[in-house]
Amino acid sequence: TLEWCAGELSNITEVGTLQYGFVGAEAAVHLMYRCTKVPGLFEKVPKKLRGVFWMKGNAVGEELAVLQHGQWFEEDRAYLVPYSPWMWAWPKGTPKDAPAYGLLYGAKSVWEVAFGLSAYHLGFSIVFDECPGGPNLPPPFGVPGHMCTKGSGVDDLTYARLQFHFMGNLSFAGQVDMYTIEEMSKKGDKPGSTWYRGIYGGPPYFESTFGQCKPFSIGSYELTKILDEDGKPLEPYYTEFLEYMGEVPLFVWAGYGNKTVLDMLQRGDSLEAAKYMKQKAEAEAAANGMVKMPY
């Protein structure tokens, strides 16, 4: 239960009605797997999407992600994941070899991402299709599908378009850039171990002139599984992650600490709940001179 999971955290802090807590990096990996494994739902999730992933090379200060608590629609080859507690983990501090020199690992930057993702109750849609393939261009250029095997994905899952949706509203996408996941199939890898998390964009005139042309791949990273579908460490990536984190702990969104918000969500008033949380956070900022951060 979420209560048991929260009991494994230290220094639980309520921020804008949301509760966050700290835990060591290795413990976080195993807790995130256990606390997002929902019986009756987990068994229907494609094996490639089960487990715990490290956002390796992500310049933004966020480290771990879990996708295994969503719903799979076989006929549409679509997977929907609600943003929920224990799905994401952020660093309390900067690992020694943080991407982009750790420029986006400052407390304010990390906190803005952590609170924004939680408060707006994002929904993620992952729709699989045949890998289009393409040339592997030098940075900063890139084309969707250049990391997976062209023509694959018909009988397996190697390429997908990813979108996020504010409040889980699937009628519109929350991002302008094109997001993908592309299986990289590194030698010796277990299927679904490493994915290229593509972020493709381009200036507005490219789209107005060439249609949906997004020739730049900036901010992309490797979505690397470190705990497999059975909850077992996946080497060498598991050890590599722990060495990367060193002594830097992680913090997670553990749940809600406000009955008013819970009542709103149970009634289906997610938009009103988000507005209420935002108001509470702004009131904290006015009282403290800034939004109270969990560290």
Image (spheres, grey):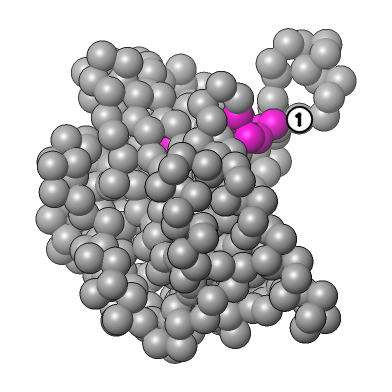
Q: Residue at x 15, y 63 (%)?
A: 232
- What residue does disc 1 label? 202
**Residue nearest the viewer, comparing 115 with 59:** 115
Residue 177 part of the magenta segment: yes
Q: Residue at x 35, y 53 (%)?
A: 66
**Residue nearest the viewer, comparing 119 with 181:** 119
Residue 142 seen in the current view:
no
- From the viewer's perspective, is 200 left or right of 202? left
- From the viewer's perspective, is 64 left or right of 168? left
Label 1 sits on what residue type?
Gly
Q: Residue at x 24, y 20 (%)?
A: 74
- From the viewer's perspective, is 290 left or right of 52? right
**Residue nearest the viewer, comparing 246 with 118:** 118
- Compared with 133, 102 (above or below) is below
Magenta range: 173-181
Q: Quadrant of residue 237?
A: bottom left
Q: Residue furthest right?
A: 205
* Label 1 environment density (alpha carbons within 10 Å; few <14, some 14–19, many ≥20): some
- Compared with 292, 100 (above or below) is above
User: Residue 21: horizontal and vertical position, in percent?
Assistant: 45, 78
- Compared with 281, 203 (above or below) is above
- From the viewer's perspective, is 242 left or right of 286? left
Number of marks in picture:
1
User: Residue 98: horizontal and vertical position, in percent?
Assistant: 58, 71
Q: Residue at x 58, y 63 (%)?
A: 114
Image quarter (top left, top right, bottom left or bottom right) of the N terminus: bottom left
Image quarter (top left, top right, bottom left or bottom right) of the C terminus: bottom right
Residue 213 seen in the current view:
yes
Q: Quadrant of residue 24?
A: bottom left
Residue 288 part of the magenta segment: no
Q: Quadrant of residue 142?
A: top right
User: Residue 270: horizontal and vertical position, in percent?
Assistant: 53, 44
